[in-house]
Image (cartoon, grey):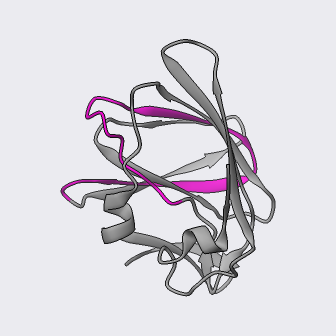
Amino acid sequence: MTKRGKDMAGYYAKEPEPEAVIYKVYELDCTGDILLAITELKPGKVGNEYHMTKGHFHESAGAGEVYFGLKGHGLILLQNKDGEAREIELTAGIVACIPPGWAHRSVNTGEEDFIFLAGFPKDAGHDYDVIKKEGFNKRVLEINGNATVVPR
């Protein structure tokens, strides 16, 4: 699955270039109960906001997710339904755990592809609607040449 700028309309403060590739996801169902996915998040920005995935909650309240960094550098933004937010830095060789009940979005803060492997329960489901409508409480912007997490 490839997400282009036109698929990300409304997620950034500015509108992305419609045909620009923002990220790709490759899913693999090989274990029965667990889905694996590799995300390839392209470097770049829309205005001064770093490329990011749409972000989602899991439909199953008990479903968490595990990320394993393969290449590049980025952040995982987390937010629960009460609005509490935090972030996890992810690079090659690092494992990040997304607890159940937390929305998550990945952000490429580097200059190369940010690639990570994700594992999650097959029945987790993905709820993108809440994030599409309400957004995350934090954004990652380039400020004075640095990736900076700021309130929305």
Q: Where is residue 75 in the image (x, y as percent from the top left)?
A: 56, 56
Q: In this view, does 70 lie to the left or right of 83?
A: right
**Residue ID at (37%, 56%):** 86
* Residue shown at 55% from the left, 87% from the top: 14
**Foreground of the two, 126 or 114:** 126
Q: Does the magenta stretch include residue 52?
A: no
Question: Residue most toward the left?
Answer: 82
Q: In screen coordinates, is 75 left or right of 46?
A: left
Q: Determine the residue positioned at 63% across, 87% down.
A: 47
Q: Is 59 located above or below residue 137 in the figure?
A: above
Q: Report if residue 72 lies within the magenta region.
A: yes
Query: Measured along the vertical axis of the image, is residue 144 above or below residue 5?
Result: below
Query: Residue 145, image x and y in percent?
Result: 68, 82
Q: Which residue is at 48% across, 15% downward?
A: 33
- Outermost residue, right direction? 112
Q: Give the range drawn in magenta.
A: 54-82
Q: Position of residue 66 (x, y in %)?
A: 51, 32
Is 63 positioned to the left or the right of 13 in the image? left
Q: Which of 26 and 119 is in front in this view?
A: 26
Q: Choose top left, top right, bottom left or bottom right for residue 92.
A: top right
Front position in the image: 126 or 110: 126
Query: Does residue 22 appear in this view?
Result: yes
Q: Residue 150 at x, y = what percent?
A: 43, 76
Is residue 136 at all visible to an observer of this figure? Answer: no
